[in-house]
Image: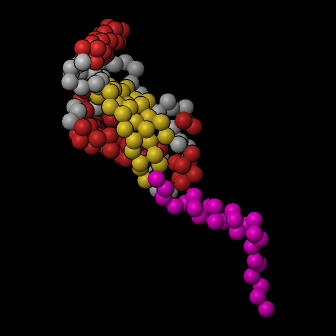
Amino acid sequence: MNNKIQPSAKDAKQELANMNCQRSKTMPFNVILTFDGYNPNQDSQETFNLSIRVSPHESDVVSFVMTKLFRRIEEKCERLGRRKQQLLKISTCANWDIFEAVTRKQSLPALGHSCKWYFGIGSTTLDIMETCAMAEFQFGTEVDRSNEEQWFKQHIAKVIALHSKQANAKNEA
């Protein structure tokens, strides 16, 4: 006689769902990088998609971002021929439910993070991830933000000038 209790169909489905959640999955990211340096031959932004594997063994979301997302962004800057030292801002959009389902840990949005990071020397508003990314990856180490208000006005003026120049070039063509 078999004394083993057979799981119900509902229990079996839940067990299968739990097993699927514990496997690695790919998490897609939409990324916008904003650069500070003015270059008439380049836009101030680069936009692209990334897919990053999420493992159930991720220690936490901050380590995931630092070791996987930022490392891939560093590589992308190199492939694009962009200076990571002039990286001003990283903006991302991702399905963080995947991270939570696979790791059973909180995601950045669950922790109240905007999933945007700013960089620059002299800034007084950097969070710990931004400060660590500047130290580890040299993101934004050539961006002077010691006078945030003046810097912001100058950056806006550079962006407007670049877009005006591009619009004039299109009109002349």
Q: Provide residue 123's location: percent of width, then percent of height.
A: 34, 19
Compared with 68, 170 (above or below) is above
Q: Quadrant of residue 129?
A: top left
Compared with 107, 147 (above or below) is above
Q: Provide residue 9's location: percent of width, then percent of height.
A: 75, 69
Does residue 32 appear in this view?
yes
Q: Quadrant of the C terminus?
A: top left
Q: Which residue corresponds to the image point at 74% horizontal and 73% vertical from the top-left?
A: 7
Q: Which residue corresponds to the image point at 32% horizontal and 44% vertical from the top-left?
A: 71
Q: Quadrant of the N terminus?
A: bottom right
Q: Is residue 162 magenta?
A: no
Q: Provide residue 148's location: percent of width, then percent of height.
A: 34, 12
Residue span colored magenta: 1-26
Q: Left or right of 169: which side holds 112?
A: right
Q: Quadrant of residue 2?
A: bottom right
Q: Which residue corresponds to the image point at 32% horizontal and 40% vertical from the top-left?
A: 73
Q: Is residue 17 magenta?
A: yes
Does residue 158 appear in this view?
no
Tell me, what colour scheme is on the image?
secondary structure
Farthest-out residue, bottom = 1
Q: Provide residue 83's location: percent of width, then percent of height.
A: 22, 31
